[in-house]
Protein backbone atom coordinates (compact mmCIF):
# COMPACT_ATOMS: atom_id res chain seq x y z
CA UNK A 1 0.00 0.00 0.00
CA UNK A 2 1.33 3.47 -0.88
CA UNK A 3 2.07 5.74 2.04
CA UNK A 4 -0.11 8.85 2.45
CA UNK A 5 1.06 12.45 2.18
CA UNK A 6 0.67 14.22 5.52
CA UNK A 7 -0.78 17.75 5.48
CA UNK A 8 -0.25 19.33 8.88
CA UNK A 9 -1.41 22.74 10.10
CA UNK A 10 -0.41 24.78 13.11
CA UNK A 11 -2.12 27.25 15.43
CA UNK A 12 -5.16 29.32 14.49
CA UNK A 13 -5.59 27.68 11.09
CA UNK A 14 -8.79 26.16 12.52
CA UNK A 15 -10.16 29.73 12.31
CA UNK A 16 -9.65 30.06 8.56
CA UNK A 17 -12.67 31.57 6.87
CA UNK A 18 -13.31 34.10 9.62
CA UNK A 19 -9.73 34.90 10.76
CA UNK A 20 -8.45 38.08 9.08
CA UNK A 21 -10.04 37.10 5.73
CA UNK A 22 -8.37 40.03 3.98
CA UNK A 23 -5.05 38.26 4.67
CA UNK A 24 -5.95 34.55 4.75
CA UNK A 25 -9.02 34.43 2.48
CA UNK A 26 -12.55 33.17 3.08
CA UNK A 27 -12.00 29.46 2.58
CA UNK A 28 -12.19 27.31 5.70
CA UNK A 29 -9.71 24.56 6.52
CA UNK A 30 -12.49 22.06 5.74
CA UNK A 31 -12.84 23.63 2.26
CA UNK A 32 -9.10 23.26 1.69
CA UNK A 33 -9.13 19.67 2.94
CA UNK A 34 -12.07 18.74 0.68
CA UNK A 35 -10.43 20.19 -2.43
CA UNK A 36 -7.10 18.58 -1.65
CA UNK A 37 -8.70 15.21 -0.96
CA UNK A 38 -10.42 15.41 -4.36
CA UNK A 39 -7.09 16.20 -6.01
CA UNK A 40 -5.19 13.50 -4.14
CA UNK A 41 -7.70 10.66 -4.41
CA UNK A 42 -9.13 8.41 -1.71
CA UNK A 43 -6.91 7.40 1.20
CA UNK A 44 -3.83 9.23 -0.02
CA UNK A 45 -3.88 12.14 2.45
CA UNK A 46 -3.65 12.54 6.22
CA UNK A 47 -4.97 16.06 6.95
CA UNK A 48 -4.69 17.45 10.50
CA UNK A 49 -4.50 20.74 12.41
CA UNK A 50 -3.49 21.50 15.97
CA UNK A 51 -2.92 24.54 18.14
CA UNK A 52 -0.36 22.60 20.18
CA UNK A 53 3.39 22.69 19.45
CA UNK A 54 4.18 19.29 20.99
CA UNK A 55 1.34 17.68 19.04
CA UNK A 56 2.78 19.10 15.83
CA UNK A 57 6.22 17.66 16.72
CA UNK A 58 4.63 14.23 17.32
CA UNK A 59 2.80 14.38 13.97
CA UNK A 60 5.95 15.44 12.08
CA UNK A 61 7.68 12.37 13.55
CA UNK A 62 4.71 10.25 12.48
CA UNK A 63 4.82 11.71 8.95
CA UNK A 64 8.49 10.82 8.71
CA UNK A 65 7.79 7.27 9.88
CA UNK A 66 4.51 6.50 8.10
CA UNK A 67 4.15 9.07 5.30
CA UNK A 68 5.50 9.57 1.77
CA UNK A 69 5.93 13.35 2.21
CA UNK A 70 4.91 16.21 4.47
CA UNK A 71 3.13 19.45 3.59
CA UNK A 72 3.40 21.79 6.56
CA UNK A 73 1.89 25.14 7.43
CA UNK A 74 3.39 25.64 10.88
CA UNK A 75 1.59 29.03 11.10
CA UNK A 76 2.90 31.11 14.01
CA UNK A 77 5.33 28.36 15.07
CA UNK A 78 7.18 28.96 11.80
CA UNK A 79 8.65 32.05 13.39
CA UNK A 80 9.30 30.74 16.91
CA UNK A 81 9.78 27.00 17.17
CA UNK A 82 13.21 25.40 17.36
CA UNK A 83 11.45 22.16 18.39
CA UNK A 84 9.57 22.05 15.07
CA UNK A 85 12.72 22.87 13.15
CA UNK A 86 14.53 20.02 14.93
CA UNK A 87 11.69 17.59 14.12
CA UNK A 88 11.90 18.63 10.46
CA UNK A 89 15.69 18.22 10.42
CA UNK A 90 15.17 14.63 11.58
CA UNK A 91 12.39 14.04 9.02
CA UNK A 92 13.43 11.61 6.29
CA UNK A 93 10.63 12.36 3.79
CA UNK A 94 10.32 15.45 1.54
CA UNK A 95 8.91 18.54 3.27
CA UNK A 96 6.95 21.26 1.46
CA UNK A 97 6.32 24.39 3.53
CA UNK A 98 3.13 26.27 2.66
CA UNK A 99 1.69 29.60 3.77
CA UNK A 100 -1.51 31.27 2.64
CA UNK A 101 0.00 34.73 2.98
CA UNK A 102 3.55 35.71 2.10
CA UNK A 103 5.27 36.14 5.49
CA UNK A 104 8.37 37.60 3.78
CA UNK A 105 6.26 40.60 2.73
CA UNK A 106 4.75 41.14 6.19
CA UNK A 107 5.82 42.28 9.69
CA UNK A 108 9.41 42.12 10.86
CA UNK A 109 8.78 39.32 13.37
CA UNK A 110 7.65 37.09 10.50
CA UNK A 111 11.04 37.49 8.78
CA UNK A 112 12.46 34.86 11.15
CA UNK A 113 11.59 31.49 9.62
CA UNK A 114 12.78 28.28 11.31
CA UNK A 115 11.02 26.01 8.79
CA UNK A 116 12.25 27.21 5.38
CA UNK A 117 15.93 26.23 5.89
CA UNK A 118 14.94 22.60 6.58
CA UNK A 119 12.17 22.31 3.97
CA UNK A 120 12.69 21.08 0.40
CA UNK A 121 10.44 23.83 -0.96
CA UNK A 122 8.28 26.74 0.16
CA UNK A 123 5.05 28.00 -1.41
CA UNK A 124 3.68 31.26 -0.01
CA UNK A 125 1.34 34.10 -0.89
CA UNK A 126 -1.12 32.21 -3.09
CA UNK A 127 -3.89 31.62 -0.55
CA UNK A 128 -5.64 28.25 -0.53
CA UNK A 129 -4.41 27.58 -4.08
CA UNK A 130 -0.94 27.18 -2.56
CA UNK A 131 -2.07 23.90 -1.02
CA UNK A 132 -2.85 22.47 -4.47
CA UNK A 133 0.61 23.49 -5.67
CA UNK A 134 2.12 22.04 -2.50
CA UNK A 135 0.47 18.68 -3.23
CA UNK A 136 1.87 18.69 -6.77
CA UNK A 137 5.27 19.65 -5.36
CA UNK A 138 5.19 16.89 -2.75
CA UNK A 139 4.26 14.32 -5.40
CA UNK A 140 7.04 15.60 -7.63
CA UNK A 141 9.55 15.26 -4.81
CA UNK A 142 8.53 11.67 -4.05
CA UNK A 143 8.56 10.69 -7.71
CA UNK A 144 11.72 9.47 -9.40
CA UNK A 145 11.92 12.83 -11.14
CA UNK A 146 12.31 14.54 -7.81
CA UNK A 147 15.14 12.40 -6.55
CA UNK A 148 18.54 14.11 -6.44
CA UNK A 149 21.21 13.03 -8.92
CA UNK A 150 23.37 10.19 -7.51
C1 LIG B 1 0.65 31.74 8.00
C2 LIG B 1 1.62 32.91 8.13
C3 LIG B 1 2.13 33.02 9.56
O1 LIG B 1 3.00 34.15 9.67
C4 LIG B 1 0.99 33.22 10.52
O2 LIG B 1 1.45 33.23 11.85
C5 LIG B 1 -0.10 32.22 10.34
C6 LIG B 1 -0.47 31.83 8.99
C7 LIG B 1 0.05 31.68 6.58
O3 LIG B 1 -0.45 30.62 6.22
O4 LIG B 1 0.03 32.68 5.89
O5 LIG B 1 -0.73 31.80 11.30
O6 LIG B 1 1.39 30.55 8.20
Image (cartoon, rainbow, N blue to C red):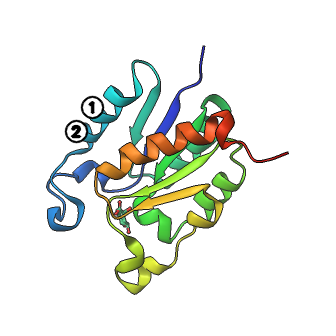
Q: Is residue 59 visible?
A: no
Residues under numbered marks 1 and 2 in contact, where contact means CB atoms less than 8 Å apart? yes
Across and down, in percent, residue 148 comes to 75, 47
Q: Which residue is drawn at 22% across and 38% down?
A: 31
The residue labelled by disc 1 is 34
Q: Which quarter of the picture shows residue 62? A: top right
- Looking at the picture, how far across and down is residue 142, in whole percent? 63, 36
The kind of secondary structure element at disc 1 is helix
Q: x, y percentage for residue 138?
A: 54, 42
Kindly tell me whether residue 12 is visible in this rendering: yes
What residue sits right under mark 2 in the picture?
31
Residue closest to the far right: 150
Residue at 37% across, 43% down? 132
- On the rendered image, what quadrant is the C terminus found in? top right
Residue 127 figure quarter: bottom left
Height in image: 121 above or below 29? below
User: Which image quarter holds the N terminus?
Assistant: top right
Number of callouts in the render?
A: 2
Does residue 36 appear to the left or right of 19 in the view shown? right
Amino acid sequence: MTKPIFVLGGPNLNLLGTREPEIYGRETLADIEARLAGQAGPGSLVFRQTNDEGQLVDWIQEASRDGAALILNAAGYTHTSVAIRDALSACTVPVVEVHLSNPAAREGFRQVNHVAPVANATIAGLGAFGYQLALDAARYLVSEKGQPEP
